[in-house]
Image (cartoon, rainbow, N blue to C red):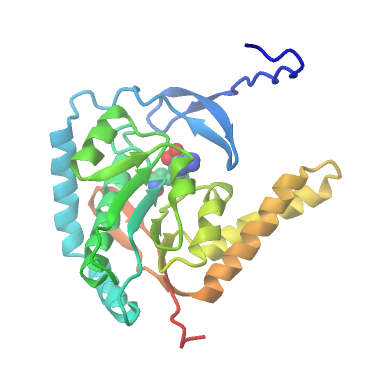
Amino acid sequence: MPHSSRRARKPYHPKRIISESEDGWSRVERTTPSRYGSTPLVDSSLPPVDRSLTVQKLLDEHTRCKQQWANSEARQWLQQLLARQVAEGGWSLDKAVCVALGSPSLSWANRLRSVWQLVMFMDMVEMVRPKLNHANELKLYAQEPRFTSLDREFLQSLAVTVLDPPQAEELVDESTFIFIPCIEWMLELPFMLVAVKSPLYVSSSMHWIADEAERSRTRLTIDFNSNKLVLKQCDDAIAAAKAVVNTHHENNMPETDFADGHSLSLTIYTLKHQDED
Ligand SMILES: C[S@@+](CC[C@H](N)C(=O)[O-])C[C@H]1O[C@@H](n2cnc3c(N)ncnc32)[C@H](O)[C@@H]1O
């Protein structure tokens, strides 16, 4: 029965955002409010950019990138780094969450970057798996609002569970390997707050994020009517970036040029052990 004294809730009208994507398509997106801010939603039924793409073709590309990655200096560097910086009892991790991968099937220009980043994410999981501090399974997840249904099938076939925003924000905790190849700082903030205690965190750079948040803060303080919530997010991001740098070793992965003209430069944050300052 309707409750007559209850005030009607203000209806929510999703905003429409029309943007031009790298592949020349106009994309119509909606936003939905969440406690993590507005999250873009893209209809997962969007067709892949290349209609002849199939899960098998994506798997073949994945294998090709994996072979190239296996022989790269960056991988060797990463392997040595993780072997050096593992805690005495092993990695205290029970899940690995990849955020903002981009879509492996949606854009001509960038889809292979996503395949590359997926290869790295999954390989890092393989590197830490033999050195976990428990016998449980380490589960893999990926969250990206632009995943098409083909991407979802592809990831499923690789045993990566797809999450819809804000499930990843809700799932991550201090036993999570967090892998965020590139995302707007405000969207990375909820992950940074958790990453302060995470043994393994991959991001663009905490310095870059702190600088971006500082710039936004400066712009906002000029405007008397500026949004207090956004100002707080700037302060939180600056503080969280500094906290991650203080609690972690900061390791800049050597910039690697892969075939297909893609170059990746990531920062690997490994939690300092108790006896380290
Ligand atoms: C700058 S792009 C990076 C894509 C890809 N990693 C690359 O390097 O080309 C940022 C990505 O973040 C995604 N994104 C936005 N909000 C997100 C959220 N809440 N969770 C996961 N991904 C998100 C966007 O859809 C977009 O694909």
Q: Position of residue 226 (x, y in %)?
A: 79, 43
- Which of the two residues, 204 or 275, is positioned nearer the viewer here? 275
Work out whether 10 lies above or below 251.
above
- Which of the two residues, 68 or 277, is positioned nearer the viewer here? 277
Q: Quadrant of ligand 1?
A: top left
- Name the side, left or right, on which 64 lies relative to 206: left
Q: Is residue 205 visible?
A: yes
**Most extreme residue toward the bottom, as rendered?**
275
**Most extreme residue toward the right, as rendered?**
224
Quarter of the image holding residue 234? bottom right
Q: Position of residue 5 (x, y in %)?
A: 77, 16
Work out whether 268 lies above or below 81.
above
User: Which residue is drawn at the image coordinates 59% and 48% (left, top)?
Assistant: 186
Total numbered labels:
0
Q: Is residue 214 visible?
A: no
Q: Position of residue 85 (x, y in %)?
A: 34, 79
- Name the side, left or right, on which 218 lies relative to 72: right
User: Which residue is drawn at the image coordinates 16% and 41% (left, top)?
Assistant: 59
- Which of the two residues, 46 or 49, is positioned nearer the viewer here? 46
Q: Position of residue 48 (x, y in %)?
A: 28, 27
Quarter placement of the N terminus: top right
User: Which residue is drawn at the image coordinates 23% and 59% (left, top)?
Assistant: 123
Quarter of the image holding residue 49? top left
Quarter of the image holding residue 272? bottom left
- Name the side, left or right, on which 50 lies relative to 95: left
